[in-house]
Image (spheres, rainbow, N blue to C red):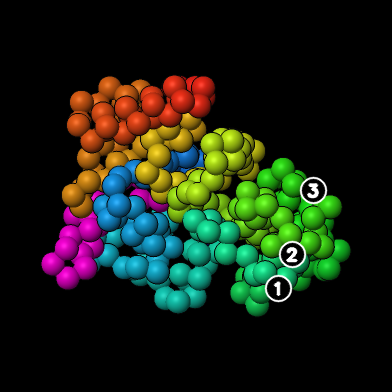
Amino acid sequence: MSASANTPAIRFDSVSKAFGSKKILSEVSFEIARGEIVFVLGKSGMGKSVTLKHIIGVMKPDAGRVFVEGKDLSTLDSRGLSGVRRRCGMVFQQPALLDSLTVYENVAFGLKSPEFRTARAASGQKELTENEIQTRVVEVLELVKLDSSILNLNPPQISYGMQKRVSLARTLAPGPSHLLFDEPTTGLDPITTQAVNKLIRELSDKLKVTSVVVSHDMACALQIADRVLVLDQARILVWGTIPEIRQSKEPLIQDFLSEALEFESQSGQEVHR
């Protein structure tokens, strides 16, 4: 996709979505700059995951438009949407690894897919050799703080926290420009949660990717987010930087902040920025 450096990575323009009589998003508008880490917070059922699904085009708005790198998704055919999805790496709540495949095979999966090969051919690039794939797999495992000693293991043979990292490595392998995280720390202990948050921040800084993190955890947002978008009752309740979020007088934000402070006192982790 060709877009100027000033073009927002992601933009919602008056997006509305309803399921039956229930409004999920109502004229929601925001822009995410390239390289930003944005947390999308809210209670269950407030449209957080629906927002992610709109970004990758698997869900279409009832009204309004969604742009990725300046491209209006509503104008794209299936081939165009496939191109958007290749640039948006999705990290799911569960690792979703294939237990019958080794760690190596899981991480290499996207690099061997027909879609990836077709995209490379379309851009004039040669098909990756097996050696190049091996090199890339080891490279992305190192990015998520794992080494080659686990390459021949199957997912059930490694810890759940390591499986989450392998899942992230698999997403990173094709080289996406944007990472979309759906509740990445759900079910993790506090230490592993801290490690995952640190990884998201490090990957953003090192790879210059745009990260959108759907979460209910204000403590995580306070640690690593550049900005926070809070959805409530189908609309944007607050959209701002960490200092702006901390100064908000909205009762829901105050509730989220009090939970974050409680986490800090119990874990000894500093959540203020």
Question: Is 53 positioned to the left or the right of 168 in the image?
Answer: left
Query: Can you give x and y, in whole percent of width and height, for residue 267 in the image?
Result: 50, 27
| Magenta highlight range | 8-31
Name the residue that disc number 2 marks.
154
Name the residue that disc number 1 marks.
100
Question: Is 205 positioned to the left or the right of 129 in the image?
Answer: left
Q: Secondary structure at mark 3?
A: loop
Disc 1 to disc 2: CB gap under 8 Å? yes
Q: How many marks overall?
A: 3
Q: Amino acid at mark 2?
A: Asn
Query: Can you give x and y, in whole percent of width and height, for residue 24 in the image?
Result: 23, 58
Disc 2 to disc 3: CB gap under 8 Å? no
Label 1, label 2: how many angstroms apart (C-alpha)? Answer: 7 Å
Q: Nearer the viewer, mark 2 or mark 3?
A: 2
Residue 93 vertical position relative to residue 237 in the rendered view, above or below: below
Question: Is 119 positioned to the left or the right of 153 in the image?
Answer: left
Magenta stretch holds residue 21: yes
Query: Can you give x and y, in whole percent of width and height, for residue 121 in the image?
Result: 68, 73
Residue located 27% across and 55% down the image: 45
Name the residue that disc number 3 marks.
147
Question: Is 241 positioned to the left or the right of 208 in the image?
Answer: left
Q: Earlier in the sequence, mark 2 or mark 3?
A: 3
